[in-house]
Amino acid sequence: MSRHDHDLTSEKPLTRLVRSGRDGAVTGPFVNPPVVHASTVLFETADDLLGGTQRYVYGRRGTPTIEALESAISEIEAAAGAVLCPSGLSAVSTALLSVLRSGDHLLMADNVYDPARSFATSVLERMGVETTFFEPTVGAAISGLFRPNTRAVYLESPGSLTFEVSDIPAIVAAARARDAFVLADNTWATPYFFKPLAHGVDLSIQAGTKYLCGHSDVMIGTIAANARALPMLKDTHGHLGLCVGPDDIYLTLRGMRTLGVRLDRQMQSALTIARWLSERNEVSRVLHPGLPSDPGHMLWKRDMTGSSGLFGVVPNDWSLDKVKAFLDGLRLFGLGFSWGGFESLAIIGRPRRTAGSWPAGDHIIRLQIGLEDTADLIGDLEASFARVSNLS
Ligand SMILES: *Cc1c(COP(=O)(O)O)cnc(C)c1O
């Protein structure tokens, strides 16, 4: 224990982001951990090789670089432990595979990231797991959807395309009463604004590709677990042989140090732009739980400490051609998938629903607000509105 190592449980979120995962015993006097490129790890003697007591044994099984990010994630998520995966989607699939067995039933929110839905209806279905999709706003009424073999509930709040907020404590209470696991994709809020495990969720998933890394140059996923789920998570993650390259881990850890200042700034800028958009007559609805008019606002305010820079805009009765022309007219917003980086982006989203219907229009313009000047971004949107004003 040196003066640099101390218990972080009383520290505020910004301090935690800066201090977590910095083990002096590994890094020595350096601020950042070594980037260890390794498959083979050498042992001093044949006894050591067989002994099973050496701290590092094989690249995939742990290095100082892996440990630095795993322990940082564990600390910022207030978790019993965490694992790293080579993409956000592999974190989703690994978390699901950790708790599900053949013959189980899964409850999945209808607003989840589309590839998570596809994983359930393809691989999980083939493995004998049946999935029922539920309305993300179901709340305590989820009780009625449980079957004797319901093993897990998977949700994403707010959903990253349609932005409904789920009542996580109510869903957790219903699941706990039946001994089911709750898995949450928390990529939108990040642990900086919401800690799923503190609200009773068992496995908290992040596409670290987004805000954690924050610079649009890494694919990575993280899963943090409470004590109940950690042994199953570690076991499945180990059997699947997942590991992440050291440079990507390093970049993610480096991005994490500035997560708080980036998100504080992106929250303010996104709220300003969302408010501006909600007053435009080209817009029928802005999907952003941080706006008091949003149906999810009260739940968001109760459970989360902030909102990130991703939200949706439903245009007022626009044809697809007009939506496309609007996007084509943008200069500062890039057109591209993913989000959470320093640059602003726009995509056209089409919600896919099976539990109910999506009431608010076929095309959602999803905006990721980056770190550019807010007034410049509004100017870009305003110029594109003007360019398409004569289209229908
Ligand atoms: C992008 C995303 C993922 C998948 O992450 P990848 O790193 O692209 O595989 C999962 N969940 C959400 C909410 C996402 O936005």
Image (cartoon, rainbow, N blue to C red):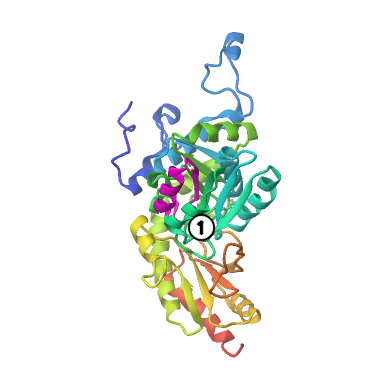
Membership of 25 in magenta stretch: no
Where's residue 280, x and y in %? Answer: 46, 82
Residue lying at 59% horizontally and 66% vertically, measured from the top left? 351
Residue lying at 38% horizontally and 47% vertically, measured from the top left? 199
Instruction: For residue 204, say whether it is visible.
Output: no
Callout count: 1
Instruction: For residue 54, say whether it is visible.
Output: yes
Question: Compared with residue 32, is residue 368 higher up or lower down, i.e. above or below?
Answer: below
Q: Is residue 272 left or right of residue 315?
A: left
Front residue of 183 and 255 = 183
Front residue of 140 and 8 = 140
Where's residue 131, x and y in %? Answer: 61, 51
When asked about the image quadrant of residue 148, the answer is top right
Residue lying at 39% horizontally and 41% vertically, measured from the top left? 78
The magenta segment is: 168-190
Residue farthest toward the left in the current orientation of the protein: 10
Quadrant where the N terminus lies? top left
Quadrant where the C terminus lies? bottom right
Residue farthest toward the right in the current orientation of the protein: 126
When asked about the image quadrant of residue 29, the answer is top left
Q: Which amino acid is tagged 1?
A: Gly
Front residue of 96 and 135 = 135
**Residue position marked by numbered label 1 in the rendering:** 340
Q: In this view, does 126 lie to the left or right of 348?
A: right
Where's residue 3, x and y in %? Answer: 30, 31
Membership of 171 in magenta stretch: yes
Mark 1 Cα-neighbour bin, 10 Å: few <14, some 14–19, many ≥20: many
- The residue carrying mark 1 has its beta carbon less than 8 Å from ligand 1: yes
